[in-house]
Image (cartoon, rainbow, N blue to C red):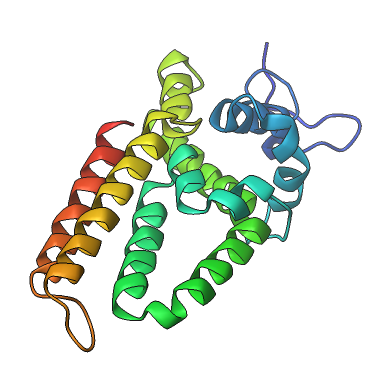
Amino acid sequence: MSVLHGGSDGDSDAGRSLLGHPAYIDDEADMRRYIGPNWPKYRNLWLVMKDVPTLVPSRCYAAAAFSSLWLLYRKRYALAFGVIALQLVVTFALPDFGGLIDLAVALILGRYGKSIVVRDGLVAIARIRAATGAADDDSYSRIVRAGGTNIIAPIAGALIAAALIAGMSVASWQFPVANGLAPGDTAALFNALRALHDVATQTR
């Protein structure tokens, strides 16, 4: 049965899927696979962003409360790594501003965390569809792997961050300096951040 024709209701070919369904239905199914079990909390945001993938304000208390750990849980590894690096550097290099940076991160993620996930999902799904060129089991599994959640990553991230903070605190106590990091802390910070990044990416 051919679906390459215009419907009586004015639907264009571009608005129909290969199965004859409105294209947005298949797009929604893809995004539902990408988001995972929490899809109902993201659907309204996706409806706003699906045609214009720009960040839209929303509310996510988990993102505000757990910031980088929430990003790891949602598999936004690169952004999580950047946030953790910023927080650790500020904590030890500019401790007076540590609380301010943490508050700013919490407010931003609490306001735009879900939008970040949806935007990344739109990009990932488009890339997968362009690569596979078909709606099949392989493309479905790729979408699921690209999205969803990872409970191991935030646990590993929290443990590594705690060990890093403890180690650097001991080093700072043993080698106090007037300003900045203690001797050897810069290398330790870099190595710990790299280890955190490796753990996060390996748990995909």
Q: Position of residue 45 (x, y in %)?
A: 73, 47
Task: Please identify the quadrant where the N terminus is shown.
Answer: top right
Give the image location of residue 30, x and y in percent: 59, 29
Q: Quadrant of residue 55?
A: bottom right
Q: What residue is at 48 percent from the left and 21 percent from the top? A: 140
> Considering the image in quadrants, where does the C terminus appear?
top left
Q: Residue furthest bottom?
A: 178
Asked whether, in this view, residue 45 is left or right of residue 134, the answer is right
Is 22 in front, or is 71?
71
Left or right of residue 88, residue 19 in this image: right
Query: As rendered, which of 32 and 161 lies closer to the eye?
Result: 161
**Residue 12 pos. (x, y %):** 76, 38
Extreme residue in the top direction = 1
Residue lying at the far front in this picture: please name it.
174
Can residue 50 be seen at all in this image of the molecule?
Answer: no
- Residue farthest to the right? 9
Depicted 111 relative to depicted 128: above or below: below
Q: Residue at x 19, y 53 (%)?
A: 192
Q: Image point 46% across, 42% down: which residue?
A: 124
- Left or right relative to 196: residue 157: right
Q: Is residue 2 above or below residue 33?
A: above
Residue 134 appears in the picture as rendered: yes
Residue at image coords 56%, 53% = 116
Residue 50, placed above or below residue 152: below
Q: Is residue 175 left or right of residue 99?
A: left
Q: Nearer the viewer, residue 162 or 135?
A: 162
Q: Is residue 198 above or below residue 53?
A: above
